């Protein structure tokens, strides 16, 4: 096996790349492993990203990787990390090319999987007319006929935000509404229509939503939908779970302010440890995970 590398970064999205930059700037050796399944792959614009608002996500990742070439202690492996064993100061990872490499610390930055309803249209329109977040894609559809697909507390959170972008909002609860009575009253006052029938199809043309269909008789003309998360949260890699990292009630890895998980030597950044699901949010958490790893490397 090669000489031990300071940090294994699992994931080369915003969180992993930001962690790599923090490590590179402090002359720590790091290997960023990425198997090319970025969460925003379906989207052609990364919005709400100061300095690069609207950039193509792939272009942004390529730009950061180019910037990282300046840091000679940071290297890349374009493939999956299959497993990690060991403990603080000596973790051993097996990579998809069969290589086994040793690391002192591990940063989990592998992101999450989006679960979509298994109904015609959701997969086809994901990132085009069906979105996960009004901050990321709401401005572009402001004033249009919008829908929210969620129920319970997610609906209570998401619907008023979408209502800030348009006066024409329908909430599709996909079953009996689980809204609190006070929320229901507020939604009615604000003019949000609530549809409890299950969605049976989305009608669309050229990746543009035209209507939401609920059974044989109900058709609602809509231009875009915002989809609440469908629990349980699914991680893109089970490595953190295998290492024993604990999760909170939402399914995110528990971390402290330095992004340390509950397993010594293992850090987490990005979508897997908080609800702040954005490129900038993931970068901030990844950068702090990198800083947390540096802190431990230089003090132990
Ligand atoms: C359709 C869509 C559009 C979006 N648009 C925006 C937007 O406009 N603006 C915005 O701010 N946010 C947007 N987001 C949210 C944003 O994409 C995420 O918050 C952000 O990408 C999270 O970064 P991350 O680094 O945590 O994870 P990811 O970006 O998902 O990156 C994780 C990386 O880890 C890799 N990986 C996973 N497991 C392994 C393994 N075992 N070995 C090696 N590599 C592995 C994956 O291949 C992936 O490349 C969007 C999300 C979606 C779903």
Image: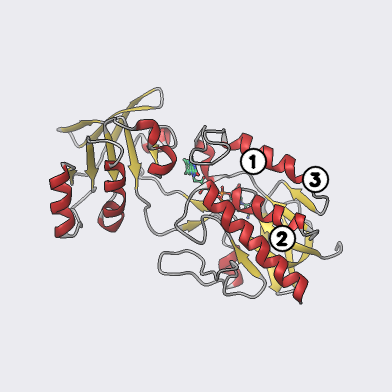
Q: Quadrant of residue 138?
A: top left
Q: Which residue is mark 2?
A: 8
Whether residue 45 is situated above or below residue 3 in the rendered picture: above
Closest to the camera, between mark 2 and mark 3, is 3
Q: Quadrant of residue 270?
A: bottom right
Q: Is residue 3 left or right of residue 175?
A: right
Q: Which residue is mark 3?
A: 70
Whether residue 160 is situated above or below residue 273 in the rendered picture: above
Q: Which residue is mark 1?
A: 61
Q: Earlier in the sequence, mark 2 or mark 1?
A: 2
Q: Earlier in the sequence, mark 1 or mark 3?
A: 1
Where disc 1 sits, the SS reads: helix
Estimate the spatial distance between the alpha carbons at disc 1 and disc 3, rounded to whole Å: 15 Å
Residue 19 — which label? Answer: none
Q: Residue at x 41, y 27 (%)?
A: 207
The image position of residue 160, as x and y in percent, is 27, 47
**Label 1 beta carbon less than 8 Å to ligand 1:** no
Q: Quadrant of the C terminus?
A: bottom right
- Neighbor class of circle 1 (other Cα within 10 Å; few <14, some 14-19, many 20+) is some
Q: Earlier in the sequence, mark 2 or mark 3?
A: 2
Where disc 2 sits, the SS reads: strand
């Amino acid at each position: 096996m090669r000489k031990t590398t300071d940090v294994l970064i699992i994931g080369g999205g915003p969180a992993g790349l930001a962690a790599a930059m923090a490590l590179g700037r402090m002359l720590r050796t790091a290997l960023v492993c990425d198997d090319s399944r970025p969460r925003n792959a379906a989207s052609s614009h990364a919005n709400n990203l100061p300095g690069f608002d609207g950039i193509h996500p792939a272009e942004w990742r390529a730009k950061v990787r180019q910037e990282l070439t300046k840091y000679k202690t940071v290297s890349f492996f374009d493939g999956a990390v299959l497993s990690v064993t060991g403990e603080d100061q000596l973790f051993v990872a097996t990579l998809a090319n069969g290589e086994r490499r040793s690391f002192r610390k591990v940063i989990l930055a592998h992101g999450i999987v989006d679960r979509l309803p298994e109904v015609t249209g959701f997969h086809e329109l994901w990132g085009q007319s069906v979105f996960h977040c009004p901050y990321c894609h709401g401005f572009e559809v402001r004033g249009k006929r919008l829908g929210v697909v969620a129920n319970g507390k997610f609906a209570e959170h998401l619907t008023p935000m979408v209502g800030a972008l348009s006066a024409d909002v329908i909430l599709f609860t996909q079953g009996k509404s689980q809204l609190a009575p006070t929320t229901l009253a507020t939604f009615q006052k604000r003019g949000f229509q609530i549809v409890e029938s299950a969605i049976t199809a989305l009608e669309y043309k050229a990746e543009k939503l035209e209507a939401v269909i609920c059974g044989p008789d109900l058709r609602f003309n809509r231009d875009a939908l915002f989809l609440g998360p469908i629990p349980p949260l699914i991680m893109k890699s089970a490595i953190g779970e295998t290492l024993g990292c604990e999760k909170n009630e939402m399914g995110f890895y528990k971390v402290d302010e330095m992004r340390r998980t509950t397993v010594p030597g293992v850090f987490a950044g990005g979508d897997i440890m908080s609800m702040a699901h954005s490129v900038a949010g993931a970068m901030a958490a990844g950068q702090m995970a990198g800083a947390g790893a540096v802190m431990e490397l230089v003090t132990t």
